[in-house]
Amino acid sequence: MTNKLVLIDGNSILYRAFFALPLLNNDKGVYTNAVYGFTTMLMKIIETEKPTHMLVAFDAGKTTFRHETYQEYKGGRQKTPPELSEQFPLIKELLDASSIKHYELPNYEADDIIGTLARVAEKESFDVRVISGDKDMLQLVTDRVQVQLTKKGLSDIDTYTPEFMKEKMEVNPEQIIDMKALMGDSSDNIPGIPGIGQKTAVKLLNQFHTLEKVFENVESVTAKKLKEKLENHQDDAFMSKQLVTINCESPIEVELKDTLYSGYDVNQLSAVFKDLGFNSLLTKVTGEVIVEEKEALEAVDIEILDNVSASLFIGVEALEVEILTDNYHLAPIEGFGIVNKDKKYFIPTEIAVKSDAFKQWAEDPEKEKWVFDAKKVTVSLLNHGIVVSGITFDLLLASYLIDPSENHHTIPAISHRMGQKQVLSDEEVYGKGAKLQVPSQDQLADHIGRKTMMLFALKSQVEEELEANQQIELLYNLELPLAVILGKMEATGVKIDQDQLNVMQKELKIRLDKIEEEVHELAGEDFNLNSPKQLGPILFEKLELPIIKKTKTGYSTSADILEQLKQKHPIIPKLLLYRQLRKLQSTYIEGLLKVVHPDTGKIHTRFNQALTQTGRLSSTEPNMQNIPIRLEEGKKIRKAFIPSEKDWVIFAADYSQIELRVLADIAKDELLVQAFQEDMDIHTRTAMDVFHVDAEDVDGNMRRQAKAVNFGIVYGISDYGLSQNLGITRKEAKAFIERYFDSYPGVKTYMEEIVKEAKQKGYVTTLMQRRRYLPDITNRNFNLRSFAERTAMNTPIQGSAADIIKKAMIDLEHALKENNLKARMLLQVHDELIIEAPKTEIELLKELVPRVMENTVSLAVPLKVDYAYGETWFDAK
């Protein structure tokens, strides 16, 4: 069997991958698009080439021996985007996990490493495959060395042999150096001979064969201007040849035996794929799941009750309400666990909810109740006409506050983390997915009893941690009261005008049909707009639009590809609009209709209070945060959200630029604080400061750029990210960011100081002591460390904004009660609170709501609340 060595140009392929794929993040927010593209290509290479030896070569730094010849070598290249720089260490970790050798050599380039190894391998009768995006590599081609060059993206590749090169380029591999010397290379800042392109260079080499022969016979060149160019730039040509020549005798310290590849370790690679969030790649490599042996559980005495009396609840504090699915609005309660210091009980659902004794105890505010998920308990008991009161502890919220980065906040998971192993996971007891089922009553009672026992036992231990973190007030004054409010909001729900949604659905269908006709007319034929296989040939063959990316199945017609072609043909904007409207129809209109409760005619979204690491609320079924409002058709969806009672209206109040106000408070930047104190438009103010103009001279584009920086700067936006957002060059974006920091030095100081603080403490905190731990803040991996630094800058701002809105909801609930108002909160969406109220209460709400929300906390700058009201949520904007 012939040995096969695969040599990969790491820098070249990673660059290609970065610019071929849209910016991707894993669940930690780490950029992964280049790593994903590179890895996908790597897996394909391993599968198709079946190498016996592999190596990925990287450039060691910006300076090489070629700079001694020509200081301006590669001088025209832009700085590598930090979003890409951060991914280089990550790909090296992935290569290590894949058992693939990688190597770099100071003062030399990846090309030199590859060239040297290729020649050594060739002498040892290896077959060699070089993978790159750099045409300089073609000089390495021989009968044994093939070079595979990426053309567009990563999947479109040409394999170069001597025969293919002669056919495609009309030169031999050894002539590549001479051709590049004549024509130069702007990407590497290699001068060549000005005015000579590939066609002329090939013509000269076909006539004279080598660069040396060209100049030996320059007198026989008949074209006068060409002859002058050659005579005037002979030194440039020979210097260029020196620059483009790969050093195939580089002093590398890696040998062929070091590149031996015998496959990857499944467990190591799987762990990296899981961390990166590469689920599709994970399925390709996952091996057997190793099941740990479980410790035997100690017996626990749990009494199953068949009747309930008032005496039962004396001293009871822990209550567990067991529901098997997240959708507690519709799912039944499987049973109740109650525990005091002496006994543990299980009460079947039917007995509990029909018992006056249970109802009286549950509704008595004087009787303490320690629960897991106060919101779930509130909603599920309301479904049975029981208005629970007296909840004084919530293990879910306490665990979440202690470490919001934990993914599993269940009683068994919390118990195990705290060293208590006497409870099985829900999955072990109930199964999951299609196998989910309720076990026998004895098994059910045992599991629920154990969970309630753990809830009771862990309270003091959890409170000690909260006390140490200065988070007791955060739990008891903010999160716990809010949980009960959110529970009531969920149970109340929002009335939906289903007729309005049906009308919109019909209107959208007409609109979509019209756009489809227009697209067919522009294409000159009918085809299925939803089929990439049919759309691709229309765009790239019939209409001859530039091909940006090809896939295994044909041309890519993804949204990011169409965005790049927007100006190329009138068919593209129509296709983009068609896709947006179609998503609107399927995801939002049809999606909302699916989650309307059959009995109430309302949607009862579930607020996720213990999910995000910043403390922000999110919601599911439906996700209220994602209803699109950029398209007019998207905004109209809000017309379907209506009051639940006659002569009531929807009242909406939202914080104006709350995160920027929090930034001004934290950074204490004088100009920023002054702008808010004087109630200036902050984006205009920023444009004035950055562009050094008066307010009347700020045009729309200046304000747009200032707005992008205002909202991007605190998220650690880079010059690359800003350039992408604004459609400007990176140089312009970099200058803009520098001018911003010159104008607002307090912001820059804050960003520097908060990162230092995070490195000292390992976490950052919000206004109300919410913590976010940053274990990667001192990581040697540049990628992980940079993300942690960006998170350190952003979390105190976004998290404090979340704290403020939560406190405002509690304050507003109290204010509505104190004023005996019927008005009630329905939704919280981003920085906005949605209320429904009788028309007779509107005048009072117009004064009350902004006053309460603006005074919920005291900052260095005033909080500002805008409000509106109308017959629908759409009208309240």
Image (tube, rainbow, N blue to C red):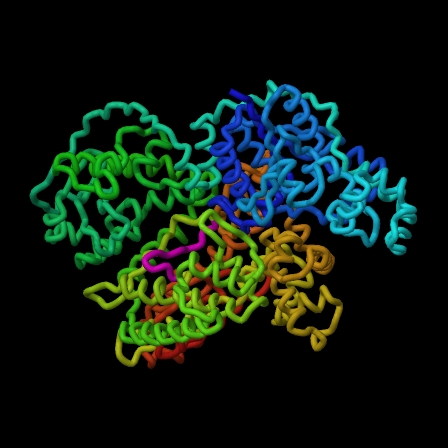
Whether residue 617 appears in magenta in the rendering, the answer is yes
Q: Is residue 639 left or right of residue 688?
A: left
> Which residue is located at x 10 percent, y 40 percent?
305
Which quadrant of the figure has residue 389?
bottom left
The quadrant the C terminus occupies is: bottom left
Quadrant for residue 840, please give it: bottom left
Compared to 427, does 225 lie above or below?
below
Please state if 536 lies on the left or on the right of 682 as rendered: left
Residue nearest the viewer, comparing 48 with 597: 48
Q: Main secondary structure of the magenta part?
A: loop
Camera-side residue of 695 and 857? 695
Residue 374 higher or lower than 510, as above or below? above
Q: Residue at x 82, y 46 (%)?
A: 192
In the image, residue 627 lies at what x, y percent? 40, 64
Q: Nearer the viewer, residue 679 or 39?
A: 39
Q: Quadrant of residue 777?
A: top right
What is the x, y in percent for residue 758?
A: 58, 41
Residue 184 falls inside the magenta stretch? no
Confirm whether residue 821 shows in the render: no
Q: Is residue 741 left or right of residue 552?
A: right
Would you place residue 127 above or below residue 532 in this image?
Answer: above
Residue range highlighted in magenta: 614-624
Q: Position of residue 57 (x, y in %)?
A: 64, 32
Q: In percent of the image, x 16 and y 53: which residue is there?
A: 359
Residue nearest the observer in this picture, 610 or 137: 137
